[in-house]
Amino acid sequence: MIEARFHDSIDSIPAQAWDALRPDDNPFVSHAFLAALEHTGCIRADWGWQAHHLGLYEDGALVAAAPLYLKGNSHGEFVFDWSWASAWERAGGDYYPKLLNAVPYSPVPGPRLLAGNGPQAAARRHALATAMRALAERMNLSSVHANFLGEDELAAFDAPWLARSDVQFHWRNHGYTNFDQFLAALNHKKRKNIRQERAHVADSGLTIEMRAGHELDAQVWRRIHALYRSTFDAKGNHAALTRAMFLAFGETLGQQVSVALARDGAEIIAMALFLQSSDTLYGRYWGASRDVPGLHFELCYYQGIEHAIRHGLQRFEPGAQGEHKMARGFLPVRTHSRHYLVDTNFRDAVRHALAREAEAMDDYAADLAAHSPYARHDTA
């Protein structure tokens, strides 16, 4: 018999048992990453996050798991359902709390249903999705949402789950030995623009370096967090990650973290933070105290591409949104989410809306695909 249990802290599940279920080494679903978010005050009820992780147990042994949260709002998700919430509440319902199967603050595609790679993995992923639906119905919640799913997880979310997709821009390594070889694959205009952007930074007199997270001391990490926070503040947004979380990037997660730094003398004036797996680099956070032409592109994109080439990584995913990334060698990739709305009438209304949205998204993706920055489409 399979038993579903829900946990209000990742610490109530042994790290070794959790990590043994990861189908790959995507860092965002590691026990260490999720625990760091909880330990450092990033997962808080007053910010709309309450851990409610799902485990499936067979004879007392954990055989499948999913990062799961009770959400009191839709902040920090990057798959936007504000209009659904507004419509449901105008009709007199309570949209929140809802259930979310995702990694907080991380629009990174990857595993969300952890069931290993064995012959029972597909059935156990389906059992996880079913257990989430059953919980929502039992708790009288409005909905369940699973965001940025891995491709092999989509089959677990059959009807009546609703499908939704979006577009991100990812870079692929086609065996490049250096940055110039990558540039040579682009068309002339894109290649020229990138060289000009990098020249602006080179002429600024700043020192640019990429450092591993474990190499940086606490003082540097405090400065990195200050840059991250001030950049959010300048845009009127909420900086969700605490200073303690940034210290954890160095102390706990440092082997999977790299930071591109820009220094003016001894002063760090800008940074871009990355995590990585064995084959993929993930761009996450940017911050700067000074506006320098081209510096954002240098730290967030070109340093990442150079790092990926140097370390033989196959992909570089720099974050959500941003058509401007195509001009810098990133190509459109579809991302996927699944949604279960408990009320059948509400579900039907959203299904019709999503059908229209899907048509528009297909047209958008097709238009993007027709504007490759590469000189040859088979190279891209």
Image (spheres, helix red, strand yellow):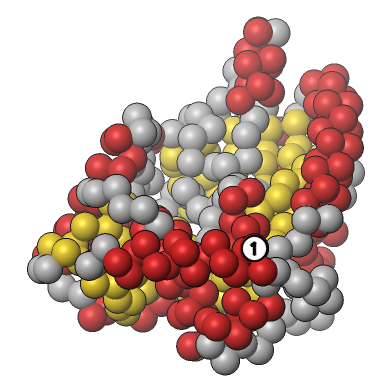
- Viewer-side residue, 344 vs 194: 194
For badge 1, the amino acid type reads: Lys
- Viewer-side residue, 148 vs 342: 148
Residue drawn at x 88%, y 26% as measured from the top left: 352
In the image: residue 283, left or right of residue 328: left
Residue drawn at x 44%, y 34% as measured from the top left: 48
Residue drawn at x 37%, y 62% as measured from the top left: 200
Quarter of the image containing the C terminus? bottom right
Q: How many neighbours does mark 1 have within 10 angstroms: few (below 14), some (14-19), or many (20 or more)? A: few
Image location of residue 202, percent across then percent down? 32, 70
Residue drawn at x 71%, y 50% as measured from the top left: 167
Image location of residue 197, percent across then percent down? 45, 62
Residue 151 figure quarter: bottom right
Local SS, label 1: helix
- Viewer-side residue, 48 vs 151: 151
In the image: residue 203, left or right of residue 331: left
In the image: residue 371, left or right of residue 5: right
- Viewer-side residue, 336 vs 173: 173
Query: Would residue 264 be seen by someone viewing this image from the given angle?
Result: yes
Q: Which residue is mark 1?
A: 189
Task: Name, please, the residue furthest toward the bottom.
Answer: 177
Residue 50 figure quarter: top left
Up/down of 81 relative to 323, above or below: above
Image location of residue 353, percent across then percent down? 83, 26
